[in-house]
């Protein structure tokens, strides 16, 4: 048993659906729902990105079958801690119907644990572990980020007349950490900006990427976003910053106050990533009404992957050894649909997105994870 054995049940939701007209159910003994352990790195749920998308998948499962989800407390902050949590769950023989690891950083840890516990069923969301007792799901995150880059290029071009450099429009990037998963998004985004710029002669430029230096530092993110908009005169910012989004929002508010006074018509536009944050750029996120300063979000459908693997497992069809691949062609890596920003999206952008989706989907454009 691992030394990190302080596990708690984060939440238990039981949803049992019985079909048939006039059916009557009599329960003589307490029902024991299926048990699924979910291991992810801190900050976990509430990160406004990947973990919250996984949470949406967890709720999707609950619409079909009773499930009890268990997560570590506290959540691991290092890969070694996450591996200890995985070992702790796996060592409780036949207790968990499935143990799920979330995030590419945990691929090696899960491979080690799954090799040591061949009878336990595992899932890897966001990476590939090629073992018979592991079902894996990978995402071509760079493809969705490519489309986000196309959006940024067109929106920067649209704002050209409202910034101090009328012959040029600049696009910025603020990532959470200089980390492989974040950089895959940044690399795809840069390729999208470049392709749109060259294909449609948009005359936009890219600033050097900046990093918050943390998964969860809203104070720092606010300072950087404000500086990028106000001091550097950046038109659109791509911001895969995970849980630092409250700071991004405050930075947008800071910039908008100055724009209202000095640069009428300019908007502090942000492209989000890893979660659908379109609503978070509206005037009131609690009651969102367009327009939103968050134009769109680059989104991997980890909720689909979680639902598909868990649902198959709980219906005795565990897809061990299988790899589920999500990309632009099947919609598993994409951008959101301008629900709160359609009022300022040019028709030319919609046509350009259709063009690039087709070119990527049929293989004519290959978006690489590295530059």
Image: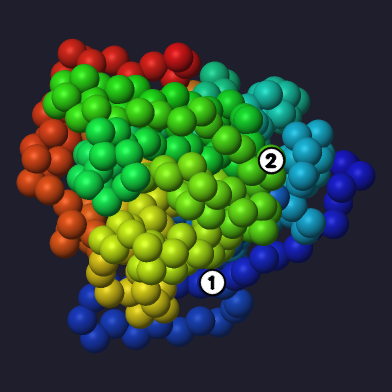
Q: Is residue 361 visible?
A: no
| Rendered-image quadrant of the N terminus | top right
Q: Secondary structure at mark 1?
A: strand
**Residue 355: mark in rendering:** none
Where does the image place residue 352, in percent across and percent down from the top left?
13, 34
The picture places residue 94, in percent across and down from the top left corner, at: 69, 46
36 sits to left or right of 59: right
Residue beneath disc 1: 13
Mark on residue 213? 2
Q: Residue at x 39, y 77 (%)?
A: 284
x then y, percent, for residue 360: 22, 22
Q: Determine whether, in the image, residue 214 is placed left or right of residue 320.
A: right
In depth, the one of 16 and 194 nearer the eye is 194
Q: Residue at x 51, y 72 (%)?
A: 14
Between 302 and 363, the one lying in front of the other is 363
115 to 299, vertically: above or below: above
Q: Against 95, is 330 above or below?
A: above
Residue 170 falls in image quadrant: top left
Q: Are marks 2 and 1 in contact (CB under 8 Å)?
A: no
**Marks 2 and 1, how far apart at CA:** 36 Å
In the current view of this chain or complex, which residue is farthest to the right? 3
> Residue at left 23%, top 55%?
338
Q: Is residue 109 above or below residue 44?
A: above
Density class for disc 1 (Cα within 10 Å; few <14, some 14-19, many ≥20) is few
Q: Which one is in front, 105 or 273?
A: 273
Q: What is the secondary structure assignment of the residue under circle 2?
A: loop
Instruction: Write the residue at 37% across / 74% down.
Output: 283
Indicate left or right for 359 with 159 as reference: left
């Amino acid at each position: 048993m691992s030394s990190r054995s302080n596990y708690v049940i984060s939440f238990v939701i039981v949803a049992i659906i019985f079909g048939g007209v006039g059916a009557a159910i009599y329960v003589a003994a307490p029902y024991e729902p299926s048990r699924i352990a979910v291991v992810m790195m801190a900050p976990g749920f509430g990160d406004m990105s990947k973990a919250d998308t996984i949470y949406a998948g967890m709720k999707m499962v609950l619409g079909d079958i009773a499930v009890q989800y268990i997560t570590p407390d506290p959540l691991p902050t290092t890969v070694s801690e996450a591996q200890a949590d995985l070992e702790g769950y796996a060592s409780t023989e036949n207790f968990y119907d499935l143990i799920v690891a979330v995030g590419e950083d945990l691929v090696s840890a899960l491979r080690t644990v799954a090799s040591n516990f061949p009878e336990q069923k595992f899932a890897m969301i966001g990476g590939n572990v090629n073992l018979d007792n592991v079902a894996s799901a990978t995402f071509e995150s760079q493809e969705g980020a490519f489309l986000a880059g196309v959006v940024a290029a067109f929106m920067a071009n649209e704002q050209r007349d409202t910034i101090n450099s009328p012959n040029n429009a600049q696009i910025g990037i603020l990532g959470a950490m200089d980390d492989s998963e974040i950089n895959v998004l940044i690399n795809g985004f840069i390729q999208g900006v470049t392709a749109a710029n060259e294909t449609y002669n948009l005359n936009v430029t890219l600033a050097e990427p900046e990093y918050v230096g943390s998964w969860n530092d809203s104070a720092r993110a606010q300072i950087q976003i404000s500086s990028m908009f106000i001091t550097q005169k950046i038109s659109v910012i791509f911001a895969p910053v995970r849980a630092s989004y409250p700071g991004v929002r405050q930075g947008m508010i800071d910039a908008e106050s100055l724009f209202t006074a000095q640069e009428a018509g300019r908007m502090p536009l942000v492209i989000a990533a890893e979660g659908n944050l379109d609503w978070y750029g509206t005037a009131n996120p609690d009651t969102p009404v367009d327009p939103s300063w968050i134009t769109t979000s680059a989104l991997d459908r980890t909720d689909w992957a979680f639902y598909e693997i868990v649902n198959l497992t709980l219906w005795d069809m565990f897809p061990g050894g299988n790899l589920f691949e999500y990309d632009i062609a099947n919609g598993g890596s994409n951008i959101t649909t301008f629900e709160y920003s359609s009022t300022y999206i040019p028709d030319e952008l919609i046509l350009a997105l259709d063009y690039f989706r087709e070119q990527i989907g049929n293989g004519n454009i290959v978006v690489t994870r590295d530059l």
